[in-house]
Amino acid sequence: MLACHLKPRIVKKKVPDSVLAEIRRMIISGEFKEGDKLPNQNEFAAQLGVSRPSLREALQTLTQLGAIEQRPGVGTILVARSPALLAGNLELPLISDTEATLQLVEARRVIEMGMVSLAVTRASQEELAAIGQVLKEMERAAERGDVETYCTKDLIYHHLIAQAAHNRFLSSLFQNIRQPFEQFLTDAFSAIPHRMQRSLVEHRKIYEAMKTRDPGQALAAMNAHLDMIEQAMEVFYRQQKAPEE
C-alpha cells in the first residue's frame, strides 16, 4: 500500500477499475505520452496507492484492449495514440438517446459482421484461445451477477475478434466506436440486467462457430446477437414510453 506520507489518489469503486480510470486521466492530462514507458509495477502501485495484484489486473485489461504493450527487456509502453483507451471522436450515445443507441447497433452490425467473417478463418489458435478464455471470464461474471466485470469482458471479447480479423482498417473502425460501445454496455446491462444471461449464450455461439471455422454459422451467430440487442432495446424503449401515453 501507499506510504503513509503520500495521499492515495484512488478511492472507492473496484480497485482495478479505479486504476484504469486513473491511468486514463494521466494520459489525457499529458502525464503519459505516446511511446512513454510506464513506471515499474512496484513504483506504479505505490504511486497509485494500490496493491500490485490490482495494478496487474488493470494492466492486463489495458493490454487486451490494445492500449499498452509489454515489451521484453523494455517494459510497459503506452501505444501511440492508444486508440483503444481514448477513442472519442463520437458523442456517447447514452441509453437515454434512442436514436443514437439504435444507430450504434447499426454501426456495430456493419463493422462486426465484417470482423467476424474475416476472423473466423484468419484467427490463430492462440487468438481463439484468448477469446475462449475471456468467454470463461464472462461466464464467471454472469454467475456472480457482476455487471461491471461482465461489461469489461464483453468489450474485450469483441476487441479480440477485431484483432483476429487481421485488418488494420477494420480494426480502426471498431476502435472508433469502442467508447460509445463501452458506454452502451454499461447502460444497457444496468437497465436490463436479465439480458446478461442471454448475451452469454449468444457470445458462446459466436465463439463455437469461430472455433469450428464455420463462416456461415459465425455470421449467423453474430447477426442473431445484434438482432437480439436491437430487439431488447426496442422493447425497453417501448416500456419506458408506455407510462407517458
Image (cartoon, helix red, strand yellow):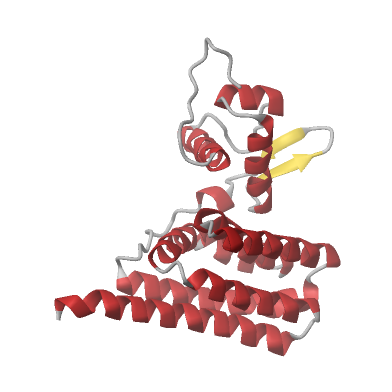
Q: Image quarter for residue 173?
A: bottom right
Q: Can you give x and y, in whole percent of width and height, for residue 47 in the image?
A: 58, 22
| Viewer-closest of 191 and 115 | 191
Q: Can you give x and y, in whole percent of width and height, for residue 67 in the image?
A: 62, 47
| Viewer-closest of 61 and 147 | 147
- Judged left or right of residue 20, residue 123 is right
Indicate whether 191 appears above or below 240.
Answer: above
The C terminus sits in image quarter: bottom left
Q: Which residue shows up at 57% across the image and 65% down it?
A: 174
Q: Can you give x and y, in whole percent of width and height, for residue 19 in the image?
A: 55, 37
Q: Image quarter for residue 72?
A: top right
Considering every residue shown, the one lying at the far top of the view is 5
Q: Is residue 97 visible?
A: yes
Indicate whether 51 appears above or below 186.
Answer: above
- Judged left or right of residue 119, residue 200 is left
Q: Which residue shows up at 57% across the image and 34% down it?
A: 33
Considering every residue shown, the one lying at the far left of the view is 245
Indicate whether 234 appears above or below 61.
Answer: below
The N terminus sits in image quarter: top right
Indicate whether 190 appears above or below 47.
Answer: below
